[in-house]
Amino acid sequence: MVKKFILVFKTHFDIGFTDLSSKVIDKYSNSMLKEVIATCKATEHMGALKYVWTMPSWPLKVITERCREDLKKELDRLIEQGQIVWHALPFTSHTDFCSAEEYIEALRFGKELSETYHKPYVISAKMTDVPGHSIMLPAILSGAGVKFLHLGCNEFATPPKVPFLFHWQAKSGEKLLTMYSKGGYGTSLFPPEDWDYPVWMALMQTNDNSGPQSASVIEKLVKNIGSKYPEAEIVCGTMDDFYNELAKCDLSNIPTITEDLGDTWIHGIGSYPKEVGLLREDRERNKRLQAIYAKHLLNSSAGDTGKAAELLDQYYENVGLFEEHTWGADVKTWLGPERVYQKDDFLKAKENGNYRFMETSWDEQRDRAKISNLTLKEVKSLIDGKESGQLSVFNPGCSEFTGWVTAKEIDKDFTDLSLEMNHEKVPVTKINGEWAFYVKNLKPFVTTPVTVIKHASDPGCLSIKKDGSIVKVENHRYILKFSEVNGEISELYDKKLKEVLLQQQNKESVFAYRYDRYGIEDVTQFLRDYAYRYSTWGIQDYGREAYPECDHKTYYPVYQSFTVEQNTLVFHYLNTESVEKYGDAKEVKLEITLPPAGDELFVTLRLKDKQETPFIESGSFLIPLADKDCRYHVNKPNVRLNPETDIEVNANHVFYCLENYISAYDDKKGVCVIPMDSPLTAIGSTGVYEFRKEYQKPEEPVLYFNLFNNMWGTNFPQWIGGDLCYRYILYGFSGDEETFNLEKAAVLKEGAEITGSTLDTEDLKLPEHMQLINVRKEQDNIVIRLKELQGEEAVRKLALNGYTITPVDLYNREIGKKMDREYMFTVKPYGIYSFLLSES
């Protein structure tokens, strides 16, 4: 029998959706704040039943900075007396798209509120609406001292098959007590019949940006509870209060869930292809720049470190806002049932105010990616702006680096030039349309000088042979076969492994581009498969209002010609009907670089003049595998997963949002693919308008990289246009090398940074098989964060002469013994480890 009820009050926060995001924040800072203050003041006399409003940390932090002075005084007073509180998370995010360091940085808003108002760090967290989340959450939240997470699922969406209350365990071992509400944002007023604990949290949540409850609501709720539980104590409080009461109980029978709760809404990121690609590129550069920042801090040469810290705060804030789950205004409100689909009608309708309003809301989201990019350029200029006249290459990694480095920042045409490193010429060629050079065994965490010399480089040469209409192109590692009649690539052979890696499967040739226009039956069947609780708004949001009767159509571009440019094969294609009627690209260009050194192959797909269409569409880049019975690993945020066993039932078994790579392998061989710009990946189909309760072995072993889609009918962009570019890195590996792919892919994707600084002091010795992901200045000290890259338990060593090393948590609180010069520590699979470095 429940002896105590804790009423927790909250509203669901959307950055946008109900209006432009700028207006939503203004509402929270003005009219909504007045309503909250009014409810709080009206209940101040009610003792334990006085109203307590819980907010995500980011909007509350913004409110404290933007509201009027008279409102600020009341706000401060209510925070001081505990009537306005916050939880640990900034807002609801698409965590499947976040990186670990970005999500860690997003915790700072709650931390800063606690420090500003001299309150304890909160130990509870909440996300609402989004059905599924990344398995990295238990590790990150536990690392910040969070003990309890509540997830409330959108009513229409099928939720993952998890218990109501469970311990969610990360691959690195951390556990987080998690409550999952299916079919609603909060909880019911009364506990479920099988609730065995003496305390219950009645989480009363209002809908999207609708504000607080009124004072009279408390009286009604208390009356309802009292009629069924006349002896129970009833209070208003926080999620922290609930956890602290629940933790006194015996929780040993609560089940443990170790699976990833893949987000079945993650397809939405495909509606912002340019911005997603830009953010992913910046994500890697940010790691490189923070490594350089650490070197400067250690050498006391960082210049204005306060400005650098401020810029990094701005960068992470805008990235976090991009990853928040809203991404635009409500389509059904502003476009509604009168929307049109035929091209001529659509182009006319785009001039109307409601269409322009929707585009403005999408531009707000695009601006976040653009602003974060500009901010990162400022970081580069600030911490790496000293031009010594000597260019160098900085390896930010924990081990030696071998691979290709883009020469874009050298800003020279290398047709008649070469590069030297360590008095030896290095291979130079064009990759992805830009000059790049190959380096071997670069020392970790130092710079190596590079010199431009006036001597034509040897670009290497491709061997090209013809056998009838079949063309074979090869370098030192791979052989590519294609037809010069239709341009279809039939095979990629690995000479080192003596195995075929990629092979045409039926219609799907190697490195093919495919365009799909979806029909009404696709939409209808998806609604049948995916719906948890039917509602009018759910059908509007997940489907398309006024969608015409039409069948599914699939298009492939028409081959025109191929050319060879240095070490790159270039295939040219055109589209016609799919352009005129729908939203396909007019021209398609496929570039395949077989470079003169290294184990990697580089592929670039360019879509020129993609048309806008309101019809549901997707573009896919296809990589058919040679082995129909291969196994797969997917590298989702901060973890490597077996999609067959590591993802919960009813979570996303269609799209995997990759952090770095996907691999397909058997006992003899495998192929690893690193999508630089397009993380959404499906196996065996396009993935659009598909829902699978469990993993299904694909009928055809084809990797589908989603280039763009407008499947979401809720608030994401409904049409996509312009010139688009997508880059991929591939390499073959022997079957016993599969465990090294996470580290290798992370290193290749991060790359190396060209710098004007000389950072050749070998001071900080980073632990092997780890990646430096975050660097921050903490007063006179430095905090670094590392993540484990081999998926194993092992002992690692961090060393730094002249410094003490102290393990800290994600709030930089000491959690272990301080050591001089070096620190030996045990890592768990994919664990995140933070250290405070202090001069001795």
Image (spheres, rainbow, N blue to C red):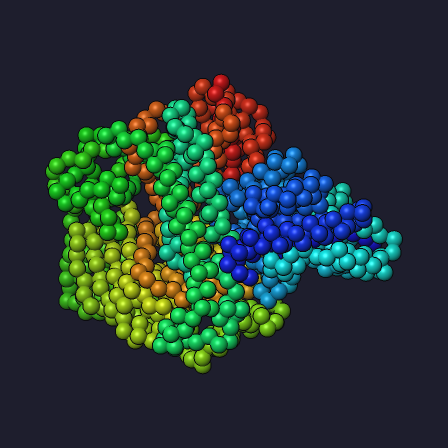
The answer to which quarter of the image holds residue 500 is bottom left
Q: Total of numbered circles in the picture? A: 0
From the top left corner, tell me how far across and down residue 292 is, in percent: 37, 33
The residue under the point 30% across, 34% down is 755
From the top left corner, tell me how far across and down residue 222 is, in percent: 81, 56
Q: Nearer the viewer, residue 489 or 336?
A: 336
Q: Nearer the viewer, residue 309 or 840?
A: 309
From the top left corner, tell me how far across and down residue 336 is, in percent: 51, 73
Left-right relation of 591 to 226: left
Image quadrant occupied by the N terminus: bottom right
Left-right relation of 320 to 594: right
The residue under the point 55% across, 37% down is 810
The residue under the point 23% across, 33% down is 450
Q: Is residue 611 visible to the viewer in this orientation of the structure? A: yes
Q: Nearer the viewer, residue 164 or 270?
A: 270
Q: Is residue 720 above or below residue 299?
A: below
Q: Is residue 325 above or below residue 385?
A: below
Left-right relation of 289 to 210: left
Q: Is residue 614 above or below residue 8?
A: below
Q: Is residue 409 above or below residue 51?
A: above
The residue under the point 60% across, 58% down is 209
From the top left corner, tell me how far across and down residue 206 is, in percent: 66, 59
Q: Is residue 703 visible to the viewer in this orientation of the structure? A: no
